[in-house]
Image: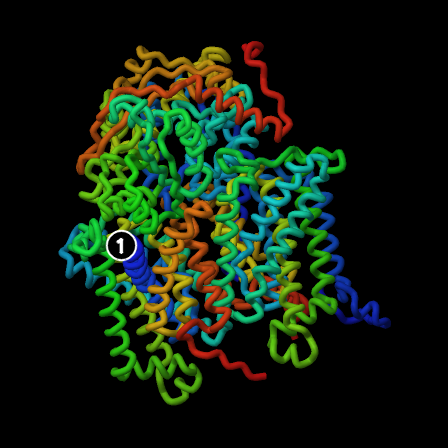
Amino acid sequence: MIYREAGTFRTTYRADQAVFPIPQDKAFVLGLVAVAYLVVPFVMTDYFFLAILIPFLILALATLGLNLLVGYCGQISLGAGGFMAVGAYSAYKLVSIVPETNLVVAWLFGGVCAAGVGILFGIPSLRIKGFYLAVATLASQFFLDWMFIRITWWTNYSPSGSATAPPLDIFGWVVDRPVEKYLLALTFAVVFAVIAKNLVRGRLGRSWMATRDMDIAAEIIGIRPMGAKLSAFAISSFVCGVAGALWAFVYLGTWEPLAFDINRSFSILFMVIIGGLGSILGSFLGAAFITLLPIFLNQVPAALGLPLSTAMVSHLEFMIFGALIIFFLIVEPHGLARLWAIGKEKLRMWPFPH
Amino acid sequence: MGPFLEVLIGGLLTGVLYSLVALGFVLIFKASGVFNFAQGAMVLFAALSLVRFLEVMPLWAALLGSAALMVALAVVIERVVLRPLVNQEPIILFMSTLGITFFIDGFGQSLFGSDVYPLDVGIPKDPIFIAENTFEGGLLVDQVDLWAAVVAGLLVLVLALFFQRTRIGRALRAVADDHQAAQSVGIPLNQIWVIVWSVAGLVALVAGIMWGTKLGVQFSIALVALKALPVLILGGLTSVPGAIVGGLLIGAGEKLAEVYFGPIIGGGIENWFAYMLALAILLFRPQGLFGERIIERV
Amino acid sequence: MRSWKVGTALVGAALAALGAAPASAQTEQFIPHLVYRTGPYAPNGIPFANGVADYYNLLNERDGGINGVKIVFEECETAYATDRGVECYERLKNKGNGAPYFMPLSTGITFALMEKGTADKIPIVTMGYGRSETAAGAFFPYVFPIVGTYWTAADIALKYIGQKEGGIEKLKGKKISLVYHDSPYGREPITLLQARAKDYGYTFDALPVTHPGVEQKATWLQIRRNRPDWVLLWGWGVMNSTAIKEAAAVGYPRDKMIGVWWSGAEPDVEPAGEGAKGYNALMLQHGAGQYAVHRDILKYVYDKGKGAGEKDKVGEVLYNRGLVNAMFSIEALRVAQEKFGKGKPINGEQMQWGLEHLNVTAERIRELGFEGMIGPLKLSCQDHEGAQIGRIHQWDGKKWNIISDFIEADRQYIHKMYEETAKKYAAEKGIQPRDCSKVS
């Protein structure tokens, strides 16, 4: 009833190939973006911006990047944290060598460096598959972690081995209020989501998906596996690198390599899976699930006035979070995005099923 | 020559300790195709339960208690997680074991505490020195590691016998080969999974005892799983002997690299070196040294 | 359908909790406390958190708060993860009348909060950890590495070695190795140890242990081969006990090992059993044991059943560190109350003034019941460290015994290093240091 495609006629190829062929979808997404830009900045508190929305958006961006690789191209990677670190440190390095660099340029440069490293560590994917590849990509994670701590050039020989971002000045706009940081992160997330959405609809995206579904078959129909896989590694790492630079510059300010350690890689992969492999929307849902749910669970007992110890609260948080992951996988193994799609199917009938 | 042999022996023995953790992964992957992210958490859970049981009961009872707990855990996991997710893609099952990890971590800590608990099951800890006449100062061998190697050897022997000689073992191999075919000839898939996860739980208990003796039982022993991963892919995800050989290679390789190559580039390289070594070998054998050959058809 | 209802109820509850906290009464002082009672570092985090909680409870139970202002403190679990720490900070910074200070007890969280604290005008009190150069208060107005930094620690360790060898000049030609956690935390002392190697003429080498440090065979076999005269240990969590065990396994004499003050508590030595006998560690002035304040805590807190931990763990090293840390912070809060209104809650900016004018004399320490644990501490605008002394204690298999007098680090030398490094930081961030002669 609410959500109906009937009456939507497409008379041109253009209309048929639109990003959102269904008007409701289009309205919904545009509405969401409009709310994020026009309403959220005025109603939310600083706590929401700094502790919830900014980390969520940046991690969603990283998840989006990894989803291109894992979800669309089928190459399981546990190197996202390492690629984020490459983005963060090379952006930092560029800014400290050439202080006049615009920060956006620096972040994109971080992404480019990450893409280069991504291609390098993506080469084994031509031979290795599945979980073997997943574990093999950990080599990059551990190596990069080690490199950023060992080679002090990366941190300008700072005795503590930590790096500090300069003030955020973008085209003369000094980003220091929480709202501004939020808008910055949001803009990056939206822009990259649009790019990604279009990328996966195009030739490149289709070649990735063919490779994912069966790489030998894809090769037979004329897709070069090397091109498809390495381009997926490059673009995915690029997005992860930009996300890493944002994580360091916008969210943390001062950081150590442990900010991009193996737990970060694992959690981003899990965001991809729980959100939905091969889904742009799923990247956002997955990031929300993995980053926000524990914080939320952690605050429930206090909100309900339960007198539990801090330790007990966090043990409960662990248990419930774990149980919820399993619960959602059982309900819908293909991720939250699929759940959303099913919800839309249901809405089509509602309130008059059959 | 002396120091070199010492590092080599130390590395090989450490590798066996990695193998103990890797074995649990292999068993589960072989029989149910699940890449079990929770193996580290299971090692921790088993060790924690054992060390807390030891406070109130003798060793044999505590061992029995922990073993029973691991079997119970296997039953619950099969019933609650695996059965509803039968026939799902490997990556989904992998994700579900993350849920299990979180749950076990929270459950174990709330039940048994988050502190560090020294574990002493009577394994001698003093180092011994061999070949003292040949080398100055002798070659140092860690007794805990030596015991771990013995235990690991026995474990592999028992597992091999179990797989080759028993009815259940044959059924396990059938399931590992092909779920559907096994089921169609009347092998109860669910029971087999319970058995496999129980065995993996018991292996986790053994690994927990060894690592707990080394480090004291605390949350960090769950992180040992990260050292087992390169062992796993090097040896092959489906091969029990592969886990042992992989462990030996990784252990010796990373220690030699750290001692002889590390100082040149600043040290601290053993973590990534282990993974790089595994990666390099995978480039030649994508299924690991002993893994089943991956045959793909269109 | 039912699950939806439960879900909605939970969402509602949480939203209520996340919204602005109700304004607290004028007679309450809200204090946030970041803890880690779970996760890999829990064995070290728990006693510290208990010490802090017990001290706050003691003040409430015995004195009725600070000058009549009751302390309301809230713990927030970080599990040692940086992003959870930041979330906790943001959640708690505006609660009550605003958080007066934060004590993160983690290098990563400290890094992330340094600038946030400065921007929000909330002091970050990092007693005995964090970046060493933050002691230069002119550059870091809101970071307070009170009682000692890692450079101070390393210098004290060298002085102690000098004493043992029979004079600092005897260090010439000696071999000193540092076994460190491969992270900014562990790397911190290297700068000083390298600089000092030139002055004193010892050979120095650093052996990194990769996080989390569960496997150190290669490191200790190298030590067995090189046979350094002294080994300094800069570890945290499981790395410490593993290092001590491996040292025992390769037969390196434990009494030639000196751990930093984060490598010298009960969870670090107890898992190593007999092997830890003779192991030394720096004390952040205080060690283990019970003093006058502990008697009060047992009487006013534990006997009333309000203790945060187990009774027999009162007086452990990290528990005492929690106590001392809470004590200094509260003393600074008192100073702030003197200036901004006795009997009123204090906010971060006022607290910063209090900290910079903190002067805890020996007499005051006796009054507070900390005599024997800690020496006087005086902070100023230039100096956010206050004291640069430490002692050494040794584990005898059962308990820690203090085996040295107070040793003072070379103040001038280290302050010069602070200044130089802080200047570099200021240049990078484009900040102007305060002129401390003009700060009242």
Which residue corresponds to the image point at 60% horizontal and 65% vertical from the top-left? A71
- Quadrant hosting residue C233: top left
Which residue corresponds to the image point at 67% horizontal and 50% vertical from the top-left? A189
Please state the chain letter of the residue tagged with numbered disc 1 in the rendered image: B
Q: Mark 1 points at which residue?
A: B2
Where does residue C316 sit, x and y in percent of width and height?
26, 33
Q: Can residue B121 be seen in this view?
A: no
Depth check, front residue: A45 or A125: A125
Depth check, front residue: C231 or A64: C231
The colour scheme used here is: rainbow
Query: Please, which residue is most extreme toward the right here?
Result: A11
Which residue corresponds to the image point at 52% horizontal and 59% vertical from the top-left? A78
Name the residue type under label 1.
Answer: Gly
- The answer to whether B143 is drawn above or below residue C427 in the figure is below
- Quadrant hosting residue C317: top left
Where does residue B288 sit, x and y in percent of width and height?
44, 71
Drawn side of residue C275 relative to residue C346, left or right: left
- The answer to whether A155 is drawn above or below residue A278 in the figure is above
Which residue corresponds to the image point at 31% horizontal and 15% vertical from the top-left? C365
